[in-house]
Image: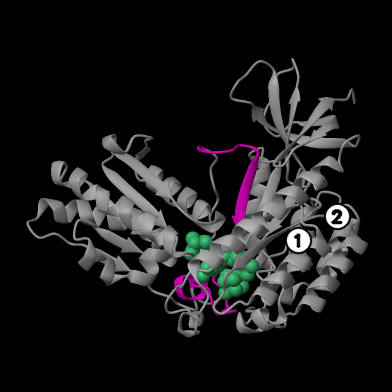
Amino acid sequence: MNLYIETFGCQMNDRDSEIMVQLLEQAGYLLCQDIANADAIIVNTCSIRGKAEQKAYSLLGSLRRIKENHPTLIIAATGCVAQQEGKKMLSRMGHIDLVIGPQGIYDLPRLFADIRQSQSATSSASQVITPQDSQFHIPPFLPDLKHGNGHKRFVTIMQGCNNFCTYCIVPFARGREVSRSKEDIVAEASHLIDLGVKEITLLGQNVNSYGNDQDPEQRTTFAELLRAVAALPGLVRLRFTTSNPKDLSPALMDCFKDLPNLCHHFHLPLQSGSDTILSRMNRKYDRAGYLNLVKGLRQACPDLAITTDIIVGFPDESDDNFQDTMDLMEEVRYNAAFSFIYSNRPPARSCDFPDTISLEVKKQRLAIFQQRQKEISLERNQEYIGQIMELMVEGESKSGHGQWSGRAQYNQIVNFNSTTTYTPGDLVQVKITEGLQNSLRGELVES
Ligand code: SAH
Ligand code: SF4
Ligand code: F3S
């Protein structure tokens, strides 16, 4: 039985896809790269913006034809659109067999087996499994490394989000925050290291509030968890994502002072530089507070690379509000930023906010922001010229010819030439010779 999987969205979905593939391989499925050869197809969906949801629906819709020619094909929709839409998805698309939310994925092998059985009977048995149980715990799960990178991996430390930023669908799609136990996380991380993994990224929608849902007597804070994972022998690099600034603790800043394997990169989503908009977004920090965090982080770690997420065109964002975002961006000088035009995501609260700003203006703002960010990213990357940097090798570039790519701890890709053959995860020293908009170039330095 061949399994094909398509994943949209964030790293949480990437990690969930890895889990689904591993579980189904244990049940006898083989991962395939060509959808035409599949006996089962999983579409792991994202609903963060309207476009992401449309992409998922359009792929699912296109499967109707394939199913007509291959009636025993199993089609499963998983992820955030599946969780949110539930039964509605089946009424829109009758050719789907399974609609499964993030909490249901551990049951996939049994659900697939049930479908196979029902196919030999006459009635079809589509199922919708979308519970949002606040008592749900991600089961202990030891990953294999059969697919994807052998040198760097994600470890999910918590599910869901409690913050209800007014524009955001995640709390509806992923439910409330549920932290995994420190023991399970450390066990998964050390298992990965035993398998040869060199870099681990801890994942959650707001890792800073890790442990807040645990018994106060026994709770582990995110900073404590980070220290426990960093201490695992053999872990070369540690990263985490993502952080709502409102919960960034001084204890977390201190980790950058004394954890040698913690990479000097912090993704700190700003969303908007305007206090009016931040308050309407329910972000629970203001620009002064955000700038203070940046200052504290840079004091703790002077060479910290800071990246961010920005939304332009939030309902009724004025020119002045947008200018506040531009001003703040100039003040922080982010290494890189992801920026998006605001998208209505019912039932998120901001869908009911009055909005008199035209799409045209929103597009212009996005273009202005992105243009300026490109210039700043270039300037930032040029500041590294002359520095000696340690890279973790990612692989040989597609063109071959001794061109290699590595990643700096600051998260940029750095290209260099070498006649040596490396394994992904090897460390090399380079001197930076060129800074480009999205990458750096370096020359090998004899270590
Ligand atoms: N948990 C993270 C955000 C994860 S979602 C945080 O709190 O910062 C990733 C990014 O998608 C967000 O940072 C935001 O910039 C963007 N985003 C979320 N909802 C959006 C919406 N309705 N319209 C446009 N962008 C959105
Ligand atoms: Fe969405 Fe806000 Fe939660 Fe981030 S913190 S996932 S933006 S609700
Ligand atoms: Fe998308 Fe769900 Fe992640 S909405 S961004 S896949 S948590």
Q: Nearer the viewer, residue 192 or 313?
A: 313
Where is 389 relative to 27, above or below? above
- Taking depth in this image into account, of 70 and 333 the one nearest to the observer is 333
Residue 15 pos. (x, y %)? 53, 53
In front: 412, or 160? 412
The image quarter containing residue 322 is: bottom right
| Residue stretch in magenta | 146-174
Residue flagged by tag 2: what amino acid is it?
Answer: Leu
Number of labels in the image equals: 2
Would you say 31 lies left or right of 357 here?
Answer: left
- The residue tagged 2 is 259
Q: Are the residues flagged by discs 1 and 2 in contact, CB closer than 8 Å?
A: yes
Residue 288 can be seen in this image: yes
The spot of residue 243 in percent (x, y) is 69, 66
Give the mark nearest the N terminus, 1 or 2: 1
Q: Where residue 154 sits: x, y (%)? A: 61, 51
Horizontal side of 5 relative to 167 (left or right) equals left
Q: Which residue is mark 1?
A: 226
